Every structure is written in C-alpha cells, then in structure tokens.
Image (spheres, rainbow, N blue to C red):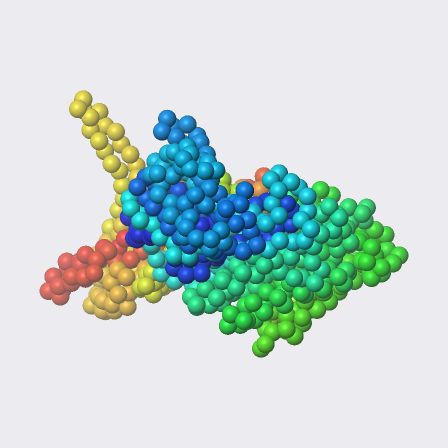
C-alpha cells in the first residue's frame, strides 16, 4: 500500500481556528512534580498540578509555531500579535493567587523592535478584574507592559515565539529545592477563552485521510504535555480507527511519596491527579470518537522513582537500567510489593476506562527479565529472585555462553516466575473489571529470540504464556524490521507459533518505530511494508507505533484504491502461441533538448525498457480469433494483467536456452539479507523479473547448488538462513512478461481477416513492484 512522508501542507484542505484554541496549549514542568492540561469545552481548559518542592512551578504554554502536530494538521505560524486581544476567565485553587508575589505571570519570549532576543514578564493581576482566585483577564498585546506595576516596559508584539503562564504552589519559594511539608495539589481553569482583533483567527490544516484499516499506538510519556483532544484529532484525521494501544508510560502517571531527600512511587499504585485527569479526558474523548482504547502497562519504571528493592539485578548486583537518559529500570517479578504496585496501577487505569464507558481492554507490555546490553548479563539475581529460584546453579554472567543443565533449569524457573506474575496481573484486572476483561500480551521478539542468546526465551517467552493464558498475543520486531533481518522475523513467527500456539485470529502485530528522525526516510518504507505483510498473513489487528513519531516525520498511510479488484493481475498465460511474426518493440522514454548551437542534451527517464507487443499477426484461424475475443473480454480489456511468453527472450540463458544455476547475478550475501530479486541483466541495464515460471528456477551460492530457499512470489527468492557475507548468489530461470491489452477496444474485421489480413492486438508491459 502506498504511503507518504509529508513535510509540509501544500494544497490540502485547510480551516480556521480561533487563536489560543484550548486544544493547542501545552504544559511543561520540572521533575518530580506532575502537571497536565485538558480541554473542558470548546473555549476552556484546565491545568492540574502536584507540587513536591518549594521551588517548582509549571508553565501553561502557547507556541507561535506548531512543532507538535503532523505537518498536514498544524496551525500556521503567526508571530505578530499586534492589535490582537486575548480574554479569559481565570479560576484557581491551591496555587499562588493572581495578586501574590511570584503569582501567575505571562512570560513572553521573542524579539524587540531592533530584532534582539528578549523576554518580558507581564503580571496578570495588572490586567485582571475580580478576585485573586476568580478574575476576568484581558490582554491587549499592542499595549501590554511588563513589570510588577504599571506603567512598565512596553512589550513589542510583532515578533513573539511563545508565551507561558507560570503556575506555582501556595508555599512557593523561588530557587528552593526543599521539599514541601506535604504534597501541594493545585488547579487552574481558563474558560471563555476569546481572541479578538487582528489575526484573531489562524489557518490550520484540516485534511482527512480516508480509513485504511490500520490502528494506532501512543504513549503518555511522549504526550503528557499535550491535550488529549489534540492527539485524537491527529489520529482520526490520519485515517486510524478502531483500537488505540495507549502505553501509560513509566515516568508520569504515578503518585509520589517522600522518601528521605527523594520521592518514590506510591506502592499501592495510586495515580497522580494530573495523570488521572488527563486519562479521564483521553478515554472519554476517544470513546466519543468511536475509538477503543487499550490500557498498556509494562514492567518498566523510571529509575529515580523506583524503590531499590523492586529492581531486577544481575549476578554482580548491578541494577537493570535501560539506555534512556535518564534511565528507567525493570521491576522484579519476584518482588511482591513491586507486583502489587503494577496491579494497583493497572486496576486504577482500567477503572478510569470502564467508568468512561469503555470495554476493559488491558495490555501487558513487554514483560521480561532484563539483559544488560554491555555484557549480556541477565538480571535474574535480585535478592528475592535468588530466594525464589532454584539454588545450586552457577550464576549466568553472559546469555551468549553455553548453558549447563542447572543454568537451563534456572532460566525455566525464572520464566515460570514471570508467567505467574503476568497471570496475577491479568487476574487482578479481570477481578476489578465490571464486566469481562480482554487481556493482551506484547512480546518483543528481537530481544527474547535473539539468536546470540538462544536460551533466553526460557525466561522471557515462558511456556506459561501459551494459549489460552491471554486473550490476544501481540508481537513487535522493529529492530529486525528496520535492519532488514527478514529471515529472523519469519523464524520468530514460526517459533512463537510453535511454542505459544495462538491462532492467527488472536495474534496482533505492531509495526514501528523510528527513534531518530534522521532515520525516517530509511525506516518508514519498511514499517509500511510490514503492515502489508501482516495483512497478507491474515493478521487482522495491526498497529503503528507510535503517534508522536508519525506526527514528527509526517507519515501518512494511504488507503487502498477503491477499484483495487479491477487492478488485479490474472496469473494466466496468453492463450495463443506466438510466432516469429509477432511484433516486438522495446521502448524508452528520453527527453532531448537541442541548444541554439545544435548540441543535444539527452536525459533517459527510464532505467529499463518497457516492452510493447502486437500479437495480432499470430492469430491464424477463426477458432483462435474466438479464443482471443473471449480472453479479451475476461480481462475487461486493459483492466487486468496476464502473462505473455516473449518468443525472443524468455530464459535467463541467452534469452532462449535451458537455464543454469549461474546465469544471472541476483545479489551478494551480507549475513543479514535473506531475500533476493530475480533479474535479467542486459549489460549495464537490469530488468526486474516478476513472473518466473514455477519449477524452472535454479539457484547457486558461490557457484554451488543452493538449498533452503523458496520462490515466494513476484520473483523473490527467500532463503531460510541468510547467505554468508561475501557470497555470490546467482540464478537461472524461465520467465513470462506481465502485460495488459493496450486499448479498451479490439477492432477485428471478419472480411479482412478472411482475406488474410492480420488484426492489430497491441499489448504493453506492466511495471510490477517486487
């Protein structure tokens, strides 16, 4: 299926929104405090905060340039605010009031009249009417003045990058890192938000991609600063429907409790108020748009918030730390308090979902025993794991090393412990759901089935996960996908099918992701193709991971053509034999520009000739004429393609000889690539062969007969194991040309045919993708 990486909006549909539309405000704040922003109406928003230290404050932000939305849906950059007026009603609780020292201040960042970067600090109380907690605020940007009192310094309104309103706790002390005596909870509401005057409305993209059958994944850790309405608008406009895998993350959902000079996650699994408010809004709005959210929770937790005793550890006591910066850690399945924390988090999120009217859909995301990337040491040795698992086995220090029976038994027992932890988590959700819950489990095959660590599956893909332990099994393999390791991907599917035995109807696929935007052009084609591949494997539930990366890179999944059935290729041969009288015309497309001096500049637009044929001269009898007409009608004229045997070029060996295994060079092995395309080489020109004759293909590696391969269609030769690096892969074959009738009409005169004049029946070669 086609896709597009949109870099900017061109001629797509657009609309207009009021400047300062509530959907497009964001929040920002320092760790460990928490904050969120949600829309509460078409002209209203709410910010919720939890403050833990005296010097923490949150910012409610309006950006002049939309850097968060998908390029097709972003609002137009407008930095000139002159003669624009912003009005809203301010209501607050638990935060510094409007009239306080360090109270809510509008910080404006931009440039002054001379073009120098500047920031202005506008005290909102100077422009408010009402009480310090409930006031009407009016900001006329052409007459704004910064400072504690008026008159102050005039703000230059014509070149503003962004502005934000500061929100601080009642016990705020500027610059202080001291903990508050107790957690401070605050909220701010802006209602009746109204823009008036010049540029009070701004242009916004409003394209609508038709539904394409794919579903979307997103994550709170990546989107906590945005409103749910903004995210869901993007998902719907990009054609995603059905389910949304929503990873609640590992660093922003939890309620924190003081622990010495730090804060750790509440062991009961209580949610932070900002996260709870955000998800109430997200679930309600998603369900109103006919999405079905899936709550996703992993065993991963932000390291700074994780009690030390909850962490998985390696044989040397080293903590299980991921490569994120700052790092996260993995919770030990052997620690009851850590597992009770996950159960508390899961049941609270599912309760929010079902209270909003949604079905209880819950995903256990990538539960595993961590393997330290630096030395492949498995983190199976936290104190409670050592107590719970068999004693006597030598410590496993490198998962790549050979294992004895004791170590294999230890891995199997670790797998059983993980399986029990996930079963307990699933049961906690089922017990808490008001109706039946659907439990999904997500596994990441490039880690758990890494061929360098052949025994890791015992611990990280345990037999206790076999069907029907969960309602659905979900797989993702993006490391292998984006590096072209298709043979490993296929072998992993087969291994998982054999070990866990989930039927195809109960198996989902997640395609993605692109961590580095510099990889977008290289990775998205593979991600898009993997969705097609999963569909061809009859995987009904397919998800793209993840919405923030889709928006960042401009990925657009395009729907199939409505008349796709009429675009089909009928894998049948032209029914009449062709003689030497058949007319054959290789055609190129070349532009030729002649300069005023008579010199030519020639540009070849095609890298390969496109064949044209006239098969009419091969029709020799009335019976063959009837066969031709019937075949033409069955193909709907030029609508459907078919095979044609070129009488002059149908073999890899000199065009008409018997194929041998060394005829055509089709690739070189690199130890990774397992698929190679059949081609016919004509000097420097290469012709893709998409319709070889089954049974005629012979393949060699370094001039020796190759085994362990299959033709999987369209001329693709696929090896079970990638050929070794440096090897030369060649093939021989017979082949047909994919063609169609060139015209909608077939003109045949009975009289001229009887007189010996051959009809004209033009055919044209079809360019087929590999």
In the picture as drawn, the residue positioned furthest to the bottom comes out as 435
> Which residue appears at 22% of the width and 31% of the height?
593
Residue at 66 percent across and 41 percent down: it is 177
Is 715 placed above or below 175 here? Answer: below
Q: Is residue 173 visible?
A: yes
Horizontal side of residue 177 vs 63, given as left or right: right
Residue at the spot 70% in from the left edge and 69% down from the top edge? 424
Q: Is residue 201 left or right of residue 238?
A: left
Looking at the rendering, in which quadrant would you find the N terminus? bottom left
Outermost residue, top direction? 597
Q: How many marks?
A: 0
The answer to which image quadrant residue 142 occupies is: top left
**Nearer to me, 281 or 395:** 281
Residue at figure coordinates x 62%, y 53% from the top left: 184
**187 up-or-down from 628: above or below:** above
Q: Position of residue 628 (x, y in %)?
A: 25, 65
Q: Is residue 612 above or below residue 247?
A: above
x, y percentage for residue 55?
A: 62, 43
Q: Residue furthest left?
A: 751
| Foreground pick, 433 / 712 | 433
Image coordinates for residue 230, horizontal then vertical, percent: 43, 55
Q: Is residue 322 visible?
A: no
Task: State the image coordinates of residue 643 (x, y, percent, origin top left).
Answer: 35, 59
Between 680 and 2, the one lying in front of the other is 2
The front one of 555 and 207 is 207
């Amino acid at each position: 299926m086609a896709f597009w990486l949109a870099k900017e909006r061109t001629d797509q549909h657009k609309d207009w929104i009021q400047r300062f539309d509530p959907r497009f405000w964001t929040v920002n704040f320092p760790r460990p405090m928490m904050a969120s922003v949600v829309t509460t109406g078409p002209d209203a928003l709410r910010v919720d905060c939890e403050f833990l230290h005296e010097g923490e404050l949150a910012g409610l932000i309006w950006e002049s340039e939309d850097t968060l939305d998908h390029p097709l849906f972003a609002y137009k950059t407008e930095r000139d605010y002159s003669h624009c007026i912003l009005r809203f009603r301010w209501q607050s609780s638990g935060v510094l009031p409007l009239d306080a020292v360090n109270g809510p201040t509008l910080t404006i960042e931009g440039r002054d009249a001379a073009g120098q970067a500047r920031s202005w600090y506008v005290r909102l109380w100077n422009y408010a009417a009402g009480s310090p907690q409930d006031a009407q605020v009016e900001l006329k940007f052409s007459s704004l003045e910064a400072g504690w009192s008026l008159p102050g310094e005039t703000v230059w309104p014509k070149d503003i990058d962004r502005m934000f309103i500061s929100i601080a706790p009642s016990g705020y002390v500027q610059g202080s890192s001291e903990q508050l005596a107790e957690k401070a909870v605050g909220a701010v509401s802006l209602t009746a938000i109204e823009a008036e005057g010049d540029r009070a409305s701004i242009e916004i993209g409003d394209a609508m991609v038709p539904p394409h059958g794919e579903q979307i994944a997103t994550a709170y850790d990546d989107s906590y600063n945005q409103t749910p309405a903004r995210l869901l608008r993007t998902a719907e406009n990009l054609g995603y429907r059905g389910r949304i895998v929503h990873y609640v993350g590992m660093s922003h959902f939890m309620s924190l409790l003081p622990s010495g000079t730090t804060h750790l996650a509440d062991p009961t699994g209580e949610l932070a108020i900002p996260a709870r408010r955000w998800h109430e809004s997200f679930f309600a709005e998603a369900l109103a748009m006919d999405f079905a959210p899936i709550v996703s929770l992993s065993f991963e937790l932000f390291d700074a918030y994780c009690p030390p005793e909850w962490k998985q550890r390696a044989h040397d006591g080293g903590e299980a730390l991921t490569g994120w910066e700052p790092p996260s850690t993995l919770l030990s399945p052997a620690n009851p308090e850590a597992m009770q924390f996950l159960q508390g988090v899961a049941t609270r999120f599912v309760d929010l979902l079902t209270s909003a009217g949604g079905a209880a859909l819950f995903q256990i995301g990538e539960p595993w025993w961590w393997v330290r990337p630096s030395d492949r040491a498995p983190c199976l040795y936290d104190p409670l794991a050592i107590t719970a698992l068999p004693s006597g086995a030598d410590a496993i220090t490198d998962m790549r090393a050979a294992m004895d029976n004791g170590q294999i038994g230890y891995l199997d027992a670790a797998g059983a412990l993980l399986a029990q932890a996930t079963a307990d988590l699933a049961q906690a959700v089922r017990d808490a759901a008001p109706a039946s819950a659907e439990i999904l489990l997500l596994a990441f095959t490039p880690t758990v089935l890494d061929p360098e660590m052949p025994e890791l599956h015992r611990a990280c893909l345990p037999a206790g996960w076999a069907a029907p332990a969960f309602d659905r099994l979900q797989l993702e393999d993006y490391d292998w996908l984006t590096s072209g390791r298709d043979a490993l991907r296929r072998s992993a599917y087969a291994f998982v099918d054999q070990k866990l035995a989930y039927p195809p109807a109960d198996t989902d696929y997640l395609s993605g992701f692109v961590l580095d935007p510099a990889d977008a052009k290289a990775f998205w084609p593979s991600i898009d193709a993997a969705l097609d591949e999963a569909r061809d494997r009859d995987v009904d539930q397919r998800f793209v991971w993840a919405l923030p990366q889709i928006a960042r890179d401009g990925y657009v999944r395009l729907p199939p053509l409505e008349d796709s059935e009429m675009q089909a290729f009928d894998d049948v041969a032209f029914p009449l034999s062709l003689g030497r009288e058949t007319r054959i015309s290789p055609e190129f497309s070349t532009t030729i520009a002649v300069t005023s001096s008579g010199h030519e500049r020639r540009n070849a637009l095609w890298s390969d000739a496109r064949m044209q044929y006239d098969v009419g001269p091969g029709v020799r009898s009335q019976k063959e004429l009837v066969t031709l007409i019937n075949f033409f009608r069955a193909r709907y004229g030029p609508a459907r393609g078919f095979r044609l045997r070129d009488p002059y070029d149908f073999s890899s060996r000199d065009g008409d000889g018997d194929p041998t295994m060394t005829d055509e060079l089709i690739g070189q092995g690199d130890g990774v690539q397992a698929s190679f395309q059949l081609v016919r080489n004509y000097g420097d020109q290469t012709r893709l062969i998409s319709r070889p004759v089954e049974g005629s293909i012979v393949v060699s590696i370094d001039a020796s007969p190759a085994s362990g391969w299959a033709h999987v269609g369209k001329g693709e030769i696929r090896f079970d194991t990638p050929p070794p690096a440096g090897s030369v892969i060649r093939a021989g074959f017979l082949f047909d040309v994919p063609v169609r009738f060139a015209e909608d009409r077939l003109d045949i005169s009975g009289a001229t045919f009887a007189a010996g004049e051959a009809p004209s029946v033009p055919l044209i070669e079809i360019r087929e993708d590999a």
